Amino acid sequence: MNLANKLTLFRIILAPVFLVIFLVFREYAWTIPVLWIIFIVSEVTDYFDGFVARKFNQTSDFGKLFDPFADTLVQITYFLCFIIDRLWGDSIFPVILFLLIIYREFGILFLRNLMLKKGITLGASIYGKIKTVAYIVAVGAALLVFSLERQIHEPHTHTQAITETMLPYFKTGSLVIFALSVLFSIISFFDYLSKYKKTESVKQETT
């Protein structure tokens, strides 16, 4: 566990903290700023673990798998929060799109295991990185909608009328971003699948 991997581990630890605060303490006034702090710290940490790994030559096969695993765990936790949010009202994200993400992640896990058997470490591709950025933007948009919804229910808010008028547009924008992130995740899956097929072709040519 070098410094880069410790930063990745810290990001994993923040995920259940976000979940508990979102579900258990959602009615408290301090919830919104704390959730934003956790979200921002988590994503900043995601940048720095890669920076540290490259800067101090701490890249490893373990890190190449640990980092995308942490990304997936954290992002699915965020998405799950906004799916479960339908218990208190309208869910920001539709369940069917969330299921597509879950199926995609299990598919990637299966491919990674197959390639590990061949001694190949399947790290994040460019499409996987685009998918990760899209996930981050989608979560940020959903958290913004959640924050605005809470503001509407706060008494004596000067911007309450404006926020209530604009909220449907923010919800639509959040949904569109989430749908795009799902699309990128599916594209990245087929990219990984293509890489796996190439390894199979090379194996057949050498045997």
Image (cartoon, rainbow, N blue to C red):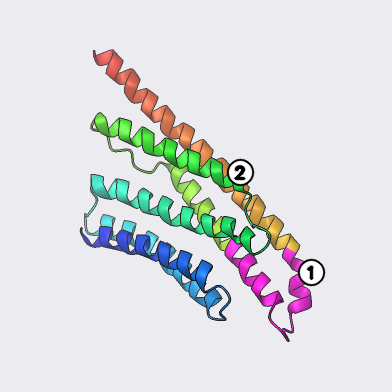
CB-based contact (under 8 Å), mark 2 and mark 1: no
Tag of residue 117? none
Residue at the disc numbered 1: 165
Quadrant of the snapshot with the C terminus: top left
Kind of residue sitting beneath label 2:
Ile
SS at circle 2: helix
Question: Which percent across, then down, holds residue 64?
Answer: 30, 47
Q: Is residue 84 magenta?
A: no
Q: Alpha-carbon neighbours of circle 1 within 10 Å: few (<14), some, or many (≥20)? A: few
Residue positioned 57% across, 41% down in the render = 183
Residue positioned 67% across, 76% down in the render = 151
Q: Main secondary structure of the magenta part?
A: helix
Instruction: Report the side of 125 relative to 172 (left or right).
Output: left
Q: In which quarter of the view is residue 27 placed?
A: bottom right
- The numbered mark, 2 or 1, whose residue comes first in the sequence reads 2
Residue at the disc numbered 2: 96
Residue positioned 43% across, 28% down in the render = 194
Q: CA distance from mark 2 to mark 1?
A: 27 Å
Q: Which residues are magenta?
A: 142-167
On the question of residue 88 being in view, the answer is yes
On the question of residue 184 being in view, the answer is no
